[in-house]
Amino acid sequence: MQMSSKRNVVLYLDRDLVEKTRNLGFNLSKTFENHLKQLITQFSQVSTLNNCESSCNKQSWWAEPDLNRRPLARKAPVTDNEDCDQLLERFHDFQIVDLRRSKRTAYEKVWFIKKLLQIMKKRPTEISREDLRSYLKSLESYSASYYKNALMALKVFFRDFLELPEAVSSFKFPHQIFKPKQIVSKEQLKQFYECLETKKEKALFMLYATTGLRRDEILSLKLEDIDFERRMITPSNHHGETKKSWVSFYNKEAEKALKEYLDSKKHSRSERLFPMQRQEVVELWKNSKRQD
C-alpha cells in the first residue's frame, strides 16, 4: 500500500513500553505504519463479517478497539487567542517545573513557539516535519546563534512537551565557527570610559570590566547581593541548570564609581541596583562606541 502523504497523529502508549521499544532500537512510527498497512490490506480482502472475524482471531497482535482510550483533544483552531495563550502558559510552566529551567529561558522558548504558531496557523499536533523544515529554512539568513535558539525551542516544545519526537528528530544544530575575541587595550578602555556621560553608566561599566559577571547578572543585582566591605558580589539570578555562578569581586576603581552612583541615585520602586532593560545597555554601549 503506497502512502501518498503523511501527517502527525497523537498516540497514547504506556511509558515503559515506549522506553523498552526505543532501547531495542525500534522506530515507533515505522512499526505502527507497517502494522497498519498489514491490517488494512488484510481487512480489504475480507468480503463478509464472518470472514473478517475469523481473520482477526488468527492475528494475535491485533488488540481490537481500545474501549478505554483517552478522549480526543478538543479541536479548537490555533488562531483562537485564548486557547493558544493557555497552551503557551502550560508550556512555560512545563519548563519551569518539569525541566527546572530559569524564567528567562522559559520565556524565550515560549516566544519562539508563539512566532511559529502565528506563522503556521495550525494546531501544534497538525504541524508536520515538512512545515518545520520550511520554517527553519526561512531562518537561514539569521545568525547561527538565533537559528540554534529557535531549533532548541522547537525540540523542547515538540519532543519534550508534546511528546512528538519524530517531528524534530532529523533537525541538527548548526556548527558555530569559533572566532577569537578581539582584546582591547587599557588605553581603548579608558577612552571608552571617558565617553560615558552619567555616574550610573560609569558604575555599570566598571562592574562589567572588573567582575567578569554576565550582563543579566549585573542587571539583576540588588544591594543585598553586594558585600561592600569585601568588595564582593554574590549573584542570585540563576535558578536553572544551564548556567552557574558564584562570587565575584570588583576593584577599588569600581568601588569609587559605584559609591558615586549610589550617592546620587534617586529613589526607585525597583529593588535592582541598575533598573535597566537589556536592550538599553546594548544601545548605551553602541552610542559610547560611536563617540569614541
Image (cartoon, helix red, strand yellow):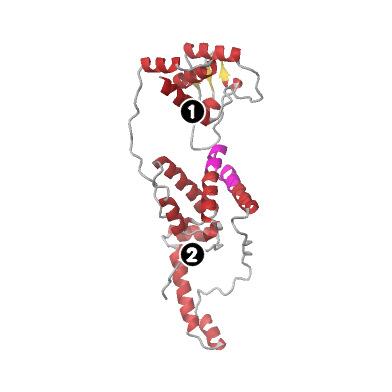
Residue displayed at 52% across by 28% down: 280
Mark 2: amino acid: Arg
**Residue 82 rendering spot, x and y as whole percentages:** 65, 52
Q: Quadrant of the N terminus?
A: bottom left
Q: CA distance from mark 1 to mark 2?
A: 45 Å
The label on residue 7 is 2
The label on residue 67 is none
Residue displayed at 54% across by 56% down: 121
**Residue 232 rendering spot, x and y as whole percentages:** 52, 18
Chief SS of the magenta region: helix
Camera-side mark, 1 or 2: 1
Q: Is residue 252 left or right of residue 72?
A: left
Q: Is residue 29 visible?
A: yes
Query: Tags 1 and 2 in contact by the CB under 8 Å rule?
Result: no
- Say if the magenta span includes residue 12: no
Residue displayed at 55% across by 45% down: 110
Q: Which residues are magenta?
A: 91-108
Q: Quadrant of the C terminus?
A: top left
Q: Is residue 126 above or below residue 184?
A: below
The label on residue 283 is 1
